[in-house]
Amino acid sequence: MSRAATIVITSVAALSLCACTTPGSSDPFVGFGPNPLLSAPQRSLLPSVGVPSVVGWPAGASPRAPAGFTVTRFASDLEHPRWLLVLPNGDVLVAESAGEPSKANKMQRGIRGFVQKMLMKKMKAAVPSPNKLVLLRDQDGDGAAESRTVFAQGLRSPFGMTLVGEVLYVANNDGVVRFAYSSGQTAAAGPAERVFDLPGPPINHHWTKNVVVSPDGSKLYATVGSNSNIGDNGMENEVGRAAIWEYDIASAKIRTFASGLRNPNGIDFEPSTGTMWTVVNERDEIGNDLPPDYLTSVRQGGFYGWPYSYWGQHVDPRVRPPRPDLVESAIVPDYGLGPHTASLGLVFYRGGTYPPSYRGGAFVTQHGSWNRQPLNGYRVVFIPFVAGRPQAPQLFLTGFLNAESKIQGRPVGVVVDKRGALLVADDVGGVIWRVTAAAQPALH
């Protein structure tokens, strides 16, 4: 028997084994809230597989929003758009990006790695990285970008972006770089300048790096995901990872701000308190309903458990050697976002065109699972905030999975544009969706 045939047969057997695990809950809000129900761990030889399939958006189709909202295409035919930044003049920067393949990642070897890579390719996640920033401009104000230009290229899997005065910072997969920027500029005037390094290749299991500026403009915060599921590539390869870094712009000093966050991505500051919040992707292979991804406020110097525990002091016995001292100090996250939802984008609504109930609440994009039965995520959820605390969740943008649970798109970056509409990057669909609200009655 040929090697290729052996791999195919073995992979099918692996998928069959995965299919025997207990399916997860069909409740759309399983694992949500400040005190989510945590099921008993379920160990398996391989991760559960949802057997996802990508079909794309039919002509004229779009995600669904609640009554009173309209969804349109701000831009289409983009190359794997991942993250967004709205510039002061209303232009929108898009990071077109994907991860780099890594032969150093032990998790991508053997049957397990083959199955994972096969599924990532099927889901259009394993694509060559465009490695560029694209600038979109809606010149006539009709809600669709008439022009697009390449702002910068030759980057290394760019993701997060933030503007501080006349300096544009971009997070590559191995560090933060900067460009000079002036209002209305459509292309970078020169090459990127290195600002500081972040843990990156050759493994770089979680490659996405985000960067945001503090409310007072003095510091940058960068996210760095773990290099594995639970330390599988060795804890020596996790130094500086599963963390949020703080960079002081004036002094160029850098430090770890918070740690034990398996894969933090979106960061924003709650409007009424100025507190930093982030969304985090949790670990795999202990059950379809465990543990939940989460949204949490971030404490300076805080440790959030990874890899030794989850949701506070729930020990993960797979991690050796154990660290009971760290488990004891692990902070319980503020709010569960459901198991394997791949929650990535986060923005607090500061616009003025949505109904009052949306003001100050958080929009979270859930990119969607590949390793869960049934599939989970593939939507944008809204979480109202009252007195700086999250409340009951609401579905806001759905339809990324069709009626047959096939993938039409996957939401990633989310921002609020200059006119108060929500913009959502859909990497699989190659679309930036724009969600507007019906005109609100004037207050008397």
Image (tube, rainbow, N blue to C red):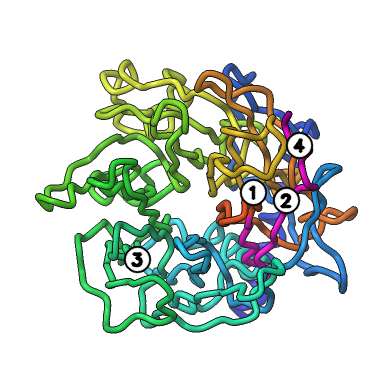
- The range drawn in magenta is 423-444
Type of amino acid at the residue the image marks with label 4 = Pro
Which image quadrant is residue 30 in? Answer: top right
168 to 264, vertically: above or below: below
Distance, label 2 to label 4, CA atoms, is: 10 Å
Query: Residue 233, how many percent across, how many down?
Result: 34, 51
Residue hosting label 4: 23
Q: Residue at x 61, y 41 (%)?
A: 363
Instruction: Point out which mark residue 172 bears.
Output: 3
Q: Earlier in the sequence, mark 4 or mark 3?
A: 4
Distance, label 3 to label 1, CA atoms, is: 27 Å
Q: Earlier in the sequence, mark 2 or mark 3?
A: 2
**Are dots 1 and 2 in contact, CB under 8 Å?**
yes
Distance, label 1 to label 2, CA atoms, is: 5 Å
Q: Secondary structure at mark 3?
A: strand
Residue hosting label 1: 371
Query: Residue 290, how many percent across, how many down?
Result: 60, 31
Q: Residue at x 78, y 46 (%)?
A: 439
